[in-house]
Amino acid sequence: MPIPGTPSRAQLVDHLVRTRIAGDVATPRENNLSHYRRLANGDRNFWFGLELGDRWADEQDVLAVMAERVGVNDDPEYRYGQDTIDPELTVDGLDRLAARLRKAAEGRERVLFATGHPGGLLDVHRATAAALRAAGCEIVVIPDGLRTDEGYVMQFADVAVLEHGATLWHTHSGEPMRAILTGLEHAGQPLPDLVVADHGWAGYAAQHGLDSVGYADSNDPALFLAESEGTLQVAVPLDDHVVSPRYYDPMTAYLLAAAGLDG
């Protein structure tokens, strides 16, 4: 069960492992390697709105970055079974993210929130948006009427999402973020100072020169590659859809406290 209040680093690490947000995660090794290979082979569904060119055409290079930044097994001969996310790397990522959120609060920046994984991360983003608004930031309101080939780009609880068939939609695509940025420009509104997101929402924003931070799973290498190249400012490794979204509450509490946004 989620732990009450704001956890210490040690308490959070223990919680992440117990809830499988990190540690021995549900995503199997063979799924991780399949996604690394598809990214390396140029499958843009795994590029998350980024332009990777031919820089990551060797899947072993992708694996090396994921071992360093996520904590997956670094042995290329290990192809089946359990894989891992290092919880210490998760908390390190949260600390880096907290520093960027603190900067946003101090500068009262315009911040856009978005998620391609609403079943897991919507409330993490919502709580972060509420804390930044309380600190004086402007949370970007997206224009009405935006859509992509997958569905409508909507905003719920301050978080941009993709809606399809009256359902919030899981997407890797960067096209919803493209729709938002284009819509803001057409409306004569300034672009965000910071994007807090995941999946292609974070990748597309980073690729197009915006300060962008986000969360990513062990089978989603693109954002970690972008962080390693300096395109994305922060990628926090975690399992982005565990059994209960309430399991993320202690992580969010830690993040906001580290950012000085816990009231």
Image (cartoon, rainbow, N blue to C red):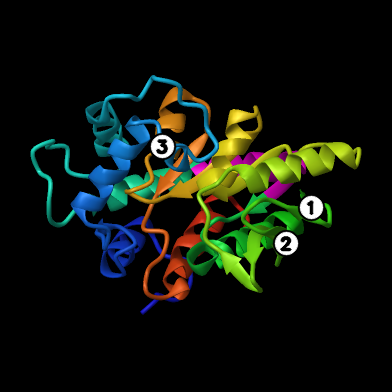
- Residue sitting at 53 percent across and 55 percent down? 171
Q: Is residue 173 left or right of residue 26?
A: right
- Residue sitting at 63 percent across and 37 percent down? 205
Q: Are marks 1 and 2 in contact (CB under 8 Å)?
A: yes
Q: How far across and down, in percent of the image, does residue 81 sit? A: 12, 56
Q: Earlier in the sequence, mark 3 or mark 1?
A: 3
Q: Mark 1 belongs to which amino acid?
A: Ile
- Residues 241 and 3: in front is 241
Above/below status of 192 relative to 12: above
- Residues 167 and 196: in front is 167
SS for dot 2: strand
Q: Earlier in the sequence, mark 3 or mark 2?
A: 3
Dividing the image into 4 quarters, which one contains the N terminus? bottom left
- Residues 80 and 189: in front is 80
Q: Is residue 174 left or right of residue 247?
A: right
Quadrant of the image occupied by residue 3? bottom left
**Which stretch appears magenta?**
97-112
Q: Mark 2 belongs to which amino acid?
A: Gln
The question of residue 107 being in magenta is answered with yes
- Residue sitting at 45 percent across and 31 percent down? 227
Mark 2 lies on residue = 155
Mark 1 lies on residue = 142
Label the magenta part by its dominant secondary structure. helix
Mark 3 lies on residue = 43
The question of residue 245 being in magenta is answered with no
* Residue at the extreme front of the image, as rendered: 149
